[in-house]
DNA sequence: ATGAAAGCGCTAACAG
DNA sequence: CTGTTAGCGCTTTCAT
């Protein structure tokens, strides 16, 4: 069994009381220099570490934050997590990462887990499946500090940070138009997700600006965000089998982009000769792809940082916060063709 | 402030003692059906969750395990983490993921963090920089259950699980030889890492078998595992600038493979016309790459699962475990050319 | 300057 | 069947 040394161990070893030892370690003033030195040296020697559970129990906070993302294998999220960690570590907080794999059930369980693990706050990006926000609302109403990033809910009133999805989608779509495409399809995640709504809006805005009619047949939703390859495959096939086949696809996410490319490759459809692609992606290997994929990149690291700063502000605020911020950060378009 | 309801809240609300409430919830037998029903219903109503810190303090375990990997953005690790989570969740454990980014300093801090956060055990894959094992040895000596996976230390006596790196490297190198290459270089991570040693051995074994002399100039180590692009770039350039330029490179890791491909692309060196590549990688997008990269794939998910099962066995064992296992799992070679 | 004691939330041994 | 109490490790009054 792993039994780390306790205050009491030090106290008995040194013939002191636990409170004296505690004071010596906490660096309180009312303590003699020699006792303090004695305790500190001994603690150092045995590599004493205070029991965090005891501390949390006493102080009613755990100095840890919970993170809920769809998957760490997604480059956007792994970069955002790096941003989160950079701030959290610097401020003395631990980071507990959980993955939903785009499943609503898993999201509920994870949120439950984290809350019951008494994290001091939550950084959440909703799963593609999530429609019902009860599990989060209830926790929020009970006072759990939370900040949403990337995929944010409409109806929970707290800090939110997103990329400028509409502008990013507009830029990508307009780039396709300027490349000569007119029949631009849109492959996207589940319809209720904030990022889907915003990116769809940007897509439509670009078409409108250039007097291209929006064709509903060209818009394909994947309710599971492309977590299942068949889901993406079917959507792409439906697009390709249309009588009036699209000459371009604007894809709303990383996983969907990969899925789409795989289908095209399998069918031996040449990009960009037969179809041109642009999509949201934070992958760092797009340059190595055989087929060019222009990409809208989100400032993931920065978003992670900002979200964490916002959350720590909520957590450490003495008074209830009632003014919430809706931060929007610009995306970058990387053209490949 | 987020103040979840406690046993005492239920007790006062219902006019019972905390122990009665505790028993009702714990489902102990010595409790009347009606009291139990009353308590359960009320607890359900207010969504009572036991305070995990209090539980950990009492039971002297946290039902959580710590994971130390170099980065979650690495496909091998993200897949391994999925395997870890699958077992851990099923057995009621939380998973706390930390990243070293191949830094020894960060590894030390993370291990310290996790230990002080009183995880019940540790799943560790060493960082590329790690030479000194004191921080782990000391913890291990004090009884912290730990299992190493993928990058394992020689001198710490516990369960270990690795891919059959030597065989995988042999297969990849032999594949290059059978493709007609004779001047095969080896680009690898830091020299002390177990995976580097084993893969180097497999590489040499394949050359030996086919009567090709090992050329020390052809072997390039990257002490930071390719975390810094310049590191990889320099190593690749050194290989390309050799008088007797290699006609193939066997690359020992995912990040290095990406880095190498990027350099070749930048220099406009054609693959496989001018140079042929094979490397360890668990990426799922290699098929989409412009340049073919034959890959040795590790059974990451399975390794994560097995490591976790081994760790839980250590954690939950009533008696000190003295028999340790060294599990080796086969890799798969995916040929692309 | 130091020690004794209470309390954070929970469980379990002991009384009743 | 239920209540009282002690104790997990720690900090913090309150005494001394």
Image (cartoon, coloured by chain):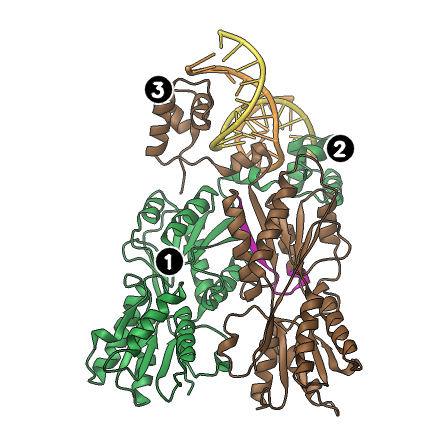
Chain colours: A brown, B green, C orange, D yellow
Q: Residue A261's x, y, as percent?
A: 58, 81
The mark found on residue B127 in the picture is 1
Against A154, residue A94 (above or below) is above
For this view, does B214 lie left or right of residue B282? left
Q: Residue A175's x, y, as percent?
A: 66, 78
Please name the residue shown 63% across and 49% down the image: A122
- Look at the numbered discs 2 and 1 and tell me whether their residues touch, using CB distance below 8 Å: no
Front-most of residues A34 and A321: A321
Q: What element carries label 1?
A: loop
Q: Mark 2 points at which residue?
A: B13
Is disc 3 on the same chain as disc 1? no
The mark found on residue A196 in the picture is none
Query: Is A220 in the magenta?
Result: no
> First in sequence: mark 2 or mark 1?
2
Q: Mark 3 points at which residue?
A: A34
Label 1 marks a residue whose chain is: B
Q: Give the range drawn in magenta.
A: A93-106
Q: Residue B56's x, y, as percent?
A: 53, 40
Please name the residue shown 60% across and 84% down the image: A263
Q: What element carries label 2?
A: helix
């Amino acid at each position: 069994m792993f039994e780390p040394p306790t205050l009491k161990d030090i106290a008995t070893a040194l013939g002191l009381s636990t409170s004296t030892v505690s004071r010596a370690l906490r660096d309180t003033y009312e303590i003699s220099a020699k006792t303090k030195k004695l305790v500190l040296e001994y603690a150092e020697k045995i590599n004493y570490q205070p029991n965090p559970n005891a501390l949390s129990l006493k102080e009613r906070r755990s100095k840890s934050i919970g993170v809920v993302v769809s998957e760490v294998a997604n480059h956007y999220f792994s970069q955002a997590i790096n941003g989160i960690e950079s701030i959290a570590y610097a401020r003395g907080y631990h980071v507990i990462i959980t993955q939903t794999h785009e499943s609503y059930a898993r999201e509920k369980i994870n949120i439950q887990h984290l809350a019951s693990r008494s994290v001091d706050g939550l950084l959440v990006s909703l799963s593609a499946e999530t429609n019902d926000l009860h599990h989060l609302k209830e926790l929020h109403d009970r006072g759990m500090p939370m900040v949403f990033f990337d995929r944010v809910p409409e109806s929970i009133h707290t800090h939110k940070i997103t990329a400028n999805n509409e502008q990013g989608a507009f830029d990508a779509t307009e780039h396709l138009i300027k490349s000569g495409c007119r029949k631009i399809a849109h492959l996207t995640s589940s319809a209720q997700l904030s990022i889907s709504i915003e990116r769809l809006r940007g897509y439509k805005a670009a078409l409108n600006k250039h007097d291209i009619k929006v064709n509903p047949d060209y818009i394909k939703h994947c309710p599971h965000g492309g977590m299942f390859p068949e889901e993406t495959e079917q959507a792409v096939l439906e697009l390709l089998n249309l009588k009036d086949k699209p000459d371009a696809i604007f894809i709303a996410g990383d996983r969907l982009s990969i899925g789409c490319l795989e289908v095209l490759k399998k069918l031996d459809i040449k990009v960009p000769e037969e179809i041109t692609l642009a999509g949201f992606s934070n992958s760092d290997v797009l340059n190595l792809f055989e087929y060019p994929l222009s990409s809208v990149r989100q400032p993931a690291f920065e978003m992670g940082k900002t979200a964490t700063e916002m959350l720590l502000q909520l957590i450490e605020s003495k008074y209830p916060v009632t003014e919430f911020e809706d931060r929007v950060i610009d995306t970058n378009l990387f053209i490949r063709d």
